[in-house]
Amino acid sequence: MYRQQIAKILNCDLATARLVEGFMRLESGTLDNLSPAKFKREARIGFACVAADRVEAESLAKSYGL
C-alpha cells in the first residue's frame, strides 16, 4: 500500500519505492500517522537518501522486512 503511494508521489518504480519506504520508517516508524503533506515530504527526503547510497538503502529496507 505505501509503496504504491510513494511510487505515485515520486514517479518511480516499486523497487525504488520499497527503498524509500525503509528510510521513511527509520524516521517515523509507522507511516499511518503522517499527514498527506508530511508523507510527501518524507518520501522526497527518503528518495534523496536512496540516491545517495542505494546499497545502504537496500540493507535498511531488508532490516524492516521490506
Image (spheres, helix red, strand yellow):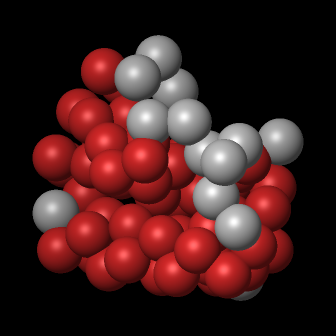
Residue 28, given in percent of the width and then of the height, sits at 43, 47
Q: How many marks?
A: 0
Q: Is any atom of residue 31 visible in this view?
A: yes
- The relative height of residue 48 versus residue 60 in the rendered view (above or below) is below
Residue 35, picture quadrant? bottom right
Of residue 34 and residue 40, the one placed in the foreground of this image is: 34
Q: Is any atom of residue 13 visible in this view?
A: no
Q: Is residue 30 left or right of residue 6?
A: left
Residue at x-position 64% and y-position 58%: 34
Q: Is residue 58 left or right of residue 41?
A: left
- The relative height of residue 14 versus residue 64 in the rendered view (above or below) is below
Of residue 3 and residue 54, the one placed in the foreground of this image is: 3
Residue at x-position 67% and y-position 81%: 37
Residue 29, picture quadrant? top left
Please identify the quadrant where the N terminus is shown. Answer: top right
- The relative height of residue 50 versus residue 48 in the rendered view (above or below) is above
Residue at x-position 27% and y-position 36%: 60
Residue 14, given in percent of the width and then of the height, sits at 68, 54
Residue 56, given in percent of the width and then of the height, sits at 16, 46
Q: Is residue 31 left or right of residue 9?
A: left
Of residue 22 and residue 51, the one placed in the foreground of this image is: 22
